[in-house]
Image (cartoon, grey):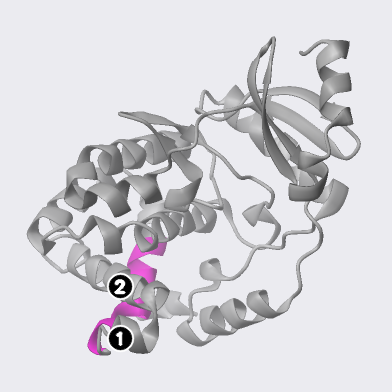
Amino acid sequence: MISLTSIARIESSTVWRQKRVEIIDLPEGRMLVKGQRPLRGPWAHRVLNLFAWMAGVPYLKAVPVHGGAQSQAIELARLAALREAGIQVPEVHHVAPDYFVMSYLGSNDLARALREQGPQAYGLWMAAMEHLLLVHARGQYLSQCFARNIIVSSRFEGLIDFEDDPLEVMTLEQAQARDWLIYLQSTLFNLALEPDRLDAALRAVLSRESEPVRAVLRHAARRLSWLRHLPTNRRIWGKDFVSLQAVGAAMVRHHQPHNESPLPEKNDA
């Protein structure tokens, strides 16, 4: 908890009210103040949902971000559940009707580390995957498992951004598989590992994931396999699509018969 003096200082600030977030140094430590998010327009979600439907991967559809008090309540509940499970997420110090205050984990994220270091950030990349295994082993999930939401320094520091809840629109196993697909989609392009090294890393980690989650990933491998046959031209398709192609190719290689037998096609429905 923080003092009434610190609360008064936070509430007198105009920064977080204008920019929604503010990093502020208080006697209790460095904190992040987070105001409520306005409701987003539906168009980006419609495009993603159309792709998910066409590709037959419902677990890649958009998760509703409600905005306002509802999103704040979801994030607070998710942070509490993850901390209870022993996952490294910010600690909440104060909650108000239109904002809350949590500990600040740092400014350096895995996306930045990968852009600046490439394959030299392999250790951080693996550490994040190990923590993702831990999240799932404890019955949890992340939703926004993008590299930008994974805070690192010289080591893994923690996870941020929980304003939506995938279990509103999918099962737990699908949400956990979605974490892997989002994580790989947001990291493989800048990590730029040789295929053999990437495949070995995925075997070492995903072999320890639960079978229900691995079954969803096998389904994703089949459904996304066609992407690897398209030209991998960033200028034509954009970085996000090329990154998704890399995920599709990696998943196909990972689920080749010598690694793991695919599920029957009837499960694609």
Looking at the rendering, the stretch of residues picked out in magenta corresponds to 216-229
Q: Secondary structure at mark 2?
A: helix
Residue 100 position by quadrant: top right
> Callout 1: few (<14), some (14-19), or many (20+) C-alpha neighbours within 10 Å?
some
Q: Amino acid at mark 1?
A: Trp
Contact (CB < 8 A) between labels 2 and 1?
A: yes
Residue 196 in picture, x, y percent from top left? 8, 59
The type of residue carrying mark 2 is: Gly
Identify the residue shown where x is 60% and y is 82%. 47
Q: Residue at horizontal 31%, vertical 76%? A: 245
Is residue 244 visible from the viewing direction of this image?
A: yes
Residue 263 can be seen, yes or no: no
Q: Is residue 227 left or right of residue 10?
A: left
Decide which of 239, 92 is in the foreground and name it. 239
Q: Quarter of the image holding residue 61? A: bottom right
Residue nearest the viewer, comparing 187 with 204: 187
Residue 39's disc is none
In the rendering, at what x and y percent does residue 185 appear? 38, 63
**Does residue 119 appear left or right of residue 185 in this picture?**
left
- State whether residue 149 is above or below residue 241: above
267 is higher (above) or lower (below) than 182: below
Label whose residue precedes the other's in the sequence (2 or 1): 1
223 in magenta:
yes
Residue under numbered circle 1: 226
